[in-house]
Image (cartoon, coloured by chain):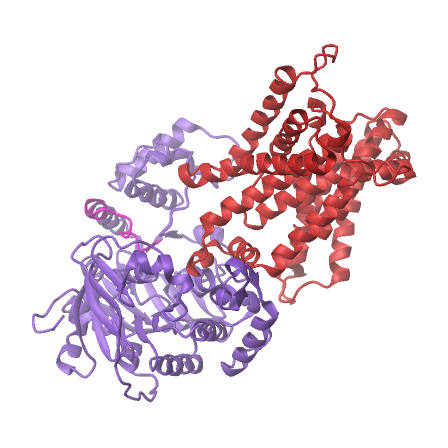
Chain colours: A purple, B red
Amino acid sequence: MSEALIRLEGISKSFGRVRANSNVSLEIVGGRVLALLGENGAGKSTLMSILAGQLRPDSGTVSARGRVLQLTSPEEAIAAGIGMVYQHFKLVEAMTVAENVFLGHRQMLINRRRIEAEVKALASQFGMSVKPSAVIRDLSMGERQQVEILKLLYRRSEVLIFDEPTAVLTPAEAENLFATMRLMLAQGKGIVFISHKLEEVMSVADDIAILRRGEIVDTVPVIEVSSTAELAERMVGRKVLLEVEKKPVEIRQQVLSLHGLGCGERGDGVSFELRQGEILGIVGVAGNGQKELVETVCGLCKPHSGTVRIFGREWGEFFRTAADDPDNTLAWIAEDRQGLATCPSLDLLDNFLLTTRRSFSGGPGKLFLFREEARKRAEYLLKTFDVRPPDLSAAAWQLSGGNLQKMVLAREFYRKPRLIVAEQPTQGLDISAMEEVWKLLLKAREAAGILLVTGDLAEALTLSDRIGVMFDGRLLACFPVEDTVSLAAVPQMMAGICKKSATV
Amino acid sequence: MQLQILKRTRRISFSGAVAVFVSAILLSLLFSGILLSLGGTPAVAGFSTLFKGGFGSRWALEDSVLKAIPIFLCSLGVAVAFRLKVWNIGAEGQYALGAIGATGVALAFPDWPSWAVLPLMALSAACAGGIWGLIPALLRQKMHTNEIIVTLMFNYIAVYLLQYLVLGVWRDPNSHGFAVSAAFSDAAIIGPLSDAASVHWGLVHCIVLGILLLLFFRYTRIGYEIKAAGENMNAARYAGIRVDFLVCLVMAISGGLAGWAGFVEVSATVNQLQPSMLVGYGYTAIVVAWLARLNPAGIAVTSFLLAGLRVGVESLQLDLQVPADFGDILEGSILLMVLAAGLFLEYRIVRKGRT
């Protein structure tokens, strides 16, 4: 094996009390693809941001060919030969390919023809078809990605990091990308490949590193991995970090029923029922339709196909009347706490009112808002849910992840929901906050049906009464958590291998 | 020495905010003072003339208040839209439509008494301005247009509509060729607060509307929803707030207030419809709204100050022959400096290695 181009040693990075990366060591070797696997929030993007010079590690070093690098800005990372192809392209749409490639060079005079010729030569050298004189806005996603890659090759990057590069590509474009990657490897460049698609990882990668809760739990050459199922198993793990007591609860009326709901591109969809008193844990590798499922059930987007009934009412009817019916409340513990569930720059009282505003309104058309009443109630809730600081005038962004999540739970449970959609509820939380959130969810189960969508199998096993596995927009299986036979098959199912025996 | 910018973890103290604001004003005065001296006018004499002209006498103060009234109402309006991050640049056009709406009523009912014609004029002006604001909102929703561009272009349509009316159907036959409408009946004129004062009852309109708006944001659910949606549109959708409805509502309120300003101006100050009443109050209103950080009380103070600037520049022009455009330069430099100084309210700058 040749010498490593880039070596990361003992990288740790914390945000407040949350450890995003903990003692991570990796080697990126020329001519090889290193795949980085891990759930959302496992610390992949933090690690890559450190490599790309956007974040600085609390401890640990990045070195290139034995020389320690000080990566304090993206320019320094690029100068050190590290380049990143972001998932969301950073291109100027009104400019041509060549202009985008040249952008950022500090040179006074531009010889357009020469740059175009250089870009063209570079593109053909790496099997890319994009025309240097084309304007970005006329290009397909695949071609735009080629421009991103050209930008890095033009700057002589030795290590290229691809963040979910195939997420926006058609299958044919993805094949092109892989061909380009092979040409780069032949030139001795090193590649880091981040993806959730296990099959892709198996076919593209030479080595696989798996991150879980900020730590590298496994580094393995791909030839030692027998199947995508084994990969999935290595990825989700089984180690239960902590135990919480789960009391049996009487299962009562149905609160949610899905029939053939299309999630993602596949139409055959998702069908299940959820009753008051149970937790249904949906597991699966991210990007297999969980987001679409959650956003449809919570009313953010219309069902593509199939039917959704919430509290027995048809989807459209429910969301038209949802605001005026305090007895049939749906609460959504959103994954994106800062961007969706709260307004970061508003204070906690305003954030508390976000979904509870109608309970504190009165007068004609619920025109008036009774802030003082809400203040008293919210103060009490902050104390009972142990949110720190218990200060309603603090802005939401000042709270740690765990406290913000407790605030969101306090708010949502105040509404006495009969259906709760909890999406990655403990992502980014430390162990003690995680335990509190789990206990709160189990308690809420006494009055509500909970749809738990999580990438953490241990969490699903701890909390759920039933487990559902999603793959490629479909629900492959749905079974009671006591069904050990089906449970053993979860990694296979997460990799898309469906067993007939599982009952849907 | 390397500097580092850190986000403030706690809000800046009141005195700190004042210091930041005052230094920004001083910097812009320094900048425009240099421009003045380069133009051959001693900066100190220039600013003292400017200040005396704007605030130095009873007459100057009254004139500043008179000009502050339409600026205040327009600014109150744009601030409502800005709270939702809807960029209404069209106060000037909505103000023109308000003047047109009020004039239509005044000319149609010349015999009506004040208690009937004035409320109807206000209603008509607010509706005309409101609709002028609502159309860009609807276009934004249905056709995904950019409201900045559309509201800006609507200003020109409004200006030409007003000119068309005073040159055509509403032209006063006794105007000796001037493009003006017939003068309003006495009943259609908002009178002065007292016989001795030149300040009119429009000032009371400002106070009442300002307080109503303050109450709207503080005590109503919709006011809260506008604030929350303005901070985080996605969170608003998450919480089931009807954002589309709010966009239409704020644009209608925004246009309605600018329209009301048009009514007050055409009735109390000009007494007839004429193109010369469009002097850019709607654009100054945008500057005022930003300087006051969308706060109604701040808008009151700032519109008075910028109105005083307009009045003061007139004396500067008369006494020292400084071009009137200097007022625009000063207004612009104050805006830029204060906006730039906003950085210091959210962030602090420290030397690297210290915190």
Residue A416 position (above or below residue B73): below
Q: Residue at x 69, y 34 (%)?
A: B117
Question: Relative to residue A483, is residue A104 drawn left or right?
Answer: right
Q: Residue B131, located in which quarter of the rendered image?
A: top right
Along the viewing direction, whichever of A169 and A314 lies nearer the viewer: A314
Residue A102: x, y in percent?
A: 43, 37
Q: Position of residue A450 (x, y in %)?
A: 31, 74
Q: Is residue A165 magenta?
A: yes
Q: Position of residue A220 (x, y in %)?
A: 24, 70
Residue at the spot 31% in from the left edge and 38% down from the top edge: A122
Check the image and report above or below for A361 versus A83. below
Residue at the location (44% across, 83% down)?
A432
Residue A425 in the image: x percent, y percent? 38, 72
Give the residues drawn in magenta, as a range.
A160-175
Q: Is residue B122 left or right of residue A485?
A: right
Residue A486 appears in the rendering: yes
Identify which residue is drawn at 44% across, 80% down: A433
Q: Nearer the viewer, residue A417 or A240?
A: A417
- Residue B38, image quadrant: top right
